[in-house]
Image (cartoon, rainbow, N blue to C red):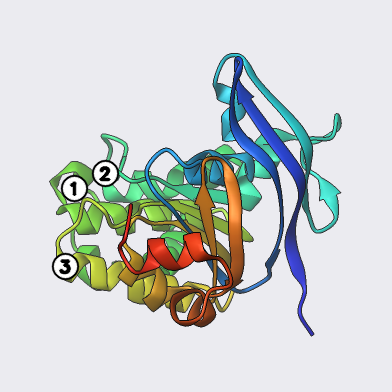
Amino acid sequence: MKFSKITVHNLNLFYGKKQALIDNTMDLEANKITALIGPSGCGKSTFLRTLNRMNDLINNVKISGTVKIDDVDIYGKNVDVVELRKRVGMIFQKSNPFPKSVYENVAYGPRIHGINNKGKLDEIIELTLKKSALWNEVKDRLNDSALGLSGGQQQRLCIARALAVNPEILLMDEPASALDPISTEKIEELIFELKNNLTIVIVTHNLQQAARVSDKCAFFMLGKIVEYTNTRKMFTNPDNEKTLNYVTGKFG
C-alpha cells in the first residue's frame, strides 16, 4: 500500500511581488526518492525549501496553500520549526561542514537535542558515519578538522550530520553538482541505500542522475509542476510535450 509522507496542495509562493511557485499540488510517497527537475530558475529549489520552512528565513516571502507531513500542516500556528527541521533534514549544493573536528560535526545535532553522554555520542557518531559510507575513511581522523576532508567526504559528512538526529525526510539540493564522478557515484549509492529508512526529495540539474536514482520525478517550469509521474515514464513516454522536449535536450 502506498503511503503519502508529504502532501502539497495548491502551494503558491511569492518573493515580494514576484510569484515563484504557482498552484502546485503533489503527493510524495514514503520511502521513495522523488527528483525535482527543470531549467534554472523554474522553482524547484524554492519548492524544496517549502518542505522544511527554510523560506521562512528570507524576507518578504508569502506562502499560501498547504504542506502536510503525516497529515499535519507544517505551516500551522503550533508547529515547532526546530522540531520540524530535525524531522526534515537538508543537504545543500555546496558541502558546508563546520570548522570543527569530524566528531564535533556529527555530534552537533544530538548535543542541541540534549544528548551529552560521551558513550551515547560515540555510538551515534559511529552509526551515522557508517550509514553515510564514511566510517572506514575517517575512523582514525575523528579529531581532525572536517575542512581537511575531500569535497566528496565533506558532503557525506554533511549527510551524516543530518542523519545524526534521526530525520524521517531528507531534502537534497543538487548534492553532487560540485563533485567529481567518483564522489558523485558514492553519493548516489548512498541515496539509494538511505531510502530504506527515509523519504528523499532531490533537486538535480543532471537528468541522468534523476533517471538513475529516483522512483518518481516532477518536471518544473516557470514555477509550476508540468508533469509528475514515475521516473521511467517521465524519461521514456511523458504525457506533456514540454516534458518530452526537456528530457530529450531540446531546451534547458
Q: Which residue is mark 2?
A: 101
Nearer mark to the viewer, of 3 and 1: 3
Q: Earlier in the sequence, mark 3 or mark 2?
A: 2
Please indicate, yes or no, whether residue 133 appears anywhere in the rendered image: no
Amino acid type, callout 1: Asp
Give the CA distance from mark 3 to mark 2: 26 Å
Instruction: Kindly indicate whether the residue at mark 1 contacts the one at mark 2 (C-beta within 8 angstroms).
Output: yes
Give the CA distance from mark 3 to mark 1: 26 Å
Q: Are there few (<14), some (14-19), or many (20+) residues within 10 Å of tag 2?
A: some
Give the secondary structure at mark 2: loop
Give the secondary structure at mark 3: helix
Residues 83 and 34: in front is 34
Q: Residue 126, percent across and down?
A: 39, 66
Instruction: Kindly indicate whether the residue at mark 1 contacts the one at mark 3 (C-beta within 8 angstroms).
Output: no
69 over 15 or under it: above or below? below
Residue depicted at x 68% and y 70%: 30
Q: Which residue is mark 3?
A: 181
Q: Residue 232, percent across and down?
A: 49, 82
Amino acid type, callout 2: Ser
* 55 horizontally vs 246: left or right: right
Residue depicted at x 29% and y 43%: 94
Q: Which mark is residue 54?
A: none
Amino acid type, callout 3: Pro
Marks counted in the figure total 3
Q: Earlier in the sequence, mark 2 or mark 1?
A: 2
Give the CA distance from mark 2 to mark 1: 5 Å
Q: Are there few (<14), some (14-19), or many (20+) residues within 10 Å of tag 3?
A: few
Residue depicted at x 56% and y 53%: 165
Q: Are there few (<14), some (14-19), or many (20+) residues within 10 Å of tag 1?
A: some
Q: Which residue is mark 1?
A: 144
